[in-house]
Amino acid sequence: MKLSDIKNILPALENVEFQLENGKLVPEHFHVTEVGMVTKNFIDCGGTIRKEERVNFQLWDADDYEHRLKPGKLLHIINLSEEKLGIGDFEIEVEYQDQTIGKYDLEFNGKNFVLKNKVTACLANEACGIPQEKQKISLSELKTDQNSCCTPDSGCC
C-alpha cells in the first residue's frame, strides 16, 4: 500500500485499527510513534547495486488506555511528515513489536489495516546458482514417437 492509498482510506474511517495477518488485533490504544522515510542502499549477492525507498510507520503498544488514535490525527501526522520531511508517495512498511520488532507490508481489508508478513528472497538467483523451479508435467501428457519401440502397443514391454 502506498502513502496515497492510506490517505484516501483514512477520511472514511471512524477508527484506525491494525491487525496482524493471523487475525490478532493490535491493541486499540496503540500509538504511531514515527512516520518517516527509509532509504536502503545495498548490493545484492550478484553484485547489483540497489536502492529501496519506503515510508515507515512505527506502531507502539502504549500503556495509555485513555487515548485512541483517530483517522484525522493520523492523517495530520502523515501530512506533517510530507511537509517537514519531503516524504514521497512510496510503499508503506510498518514496524511493530509483537514477540520482537517486525517489519510488515500493509494492506486494507475494508475495515482494518492488515500487517502482512514480509519474506526474504534472493535478488540474483542466476548469480548464486540457484536452479529455477522445475516445471511439473504429467507423464500422460508426454507425446511419444509412434515409431519408437517403447510405445504402449509396441510389444517391447
Image (cartoon, rainbow, N blue to C red):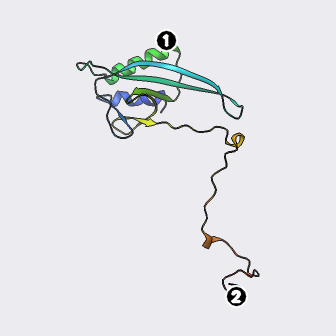
Q: Earlier in the sequence, mark 1 or mark 2?
A: 1
- SS category of the residue bearing label 2: loop
In the rendered view, would you say 33 is above or below 150? Answer: above
In the rendered view, would you say 76 is above or below 11? Answer: above
Q: Residue at x 71, y 35 (%)?
A: 46
Q: Is residue 3 left or right of residue 153?
A: left
Instruction: Give the farthest residue toward the right.
Output: 147
| Image location of residue 5, percent across then percent down | 45, 31
Task: Say what amino acid the circle numbered 1 marks.
Answer: Lys
Q: Residue at x 64, y 37 (%)?
A: 123
**Residue indicated by mark 1:** 84
In the rendered view, would you say 54 is above or below 141? Answer: above
| Image location of residue 31, percent across then percent down | 34, 20
| Image location of residue 24, percent across then percent down | 32, 37
Tell me if mark 2 has few (under 14), some (14-19) or many (20+) residues whose alpha carbon lies within 10 angstroms of its own: few
**Where residue 155 is drawn, which disc sits there?**
2
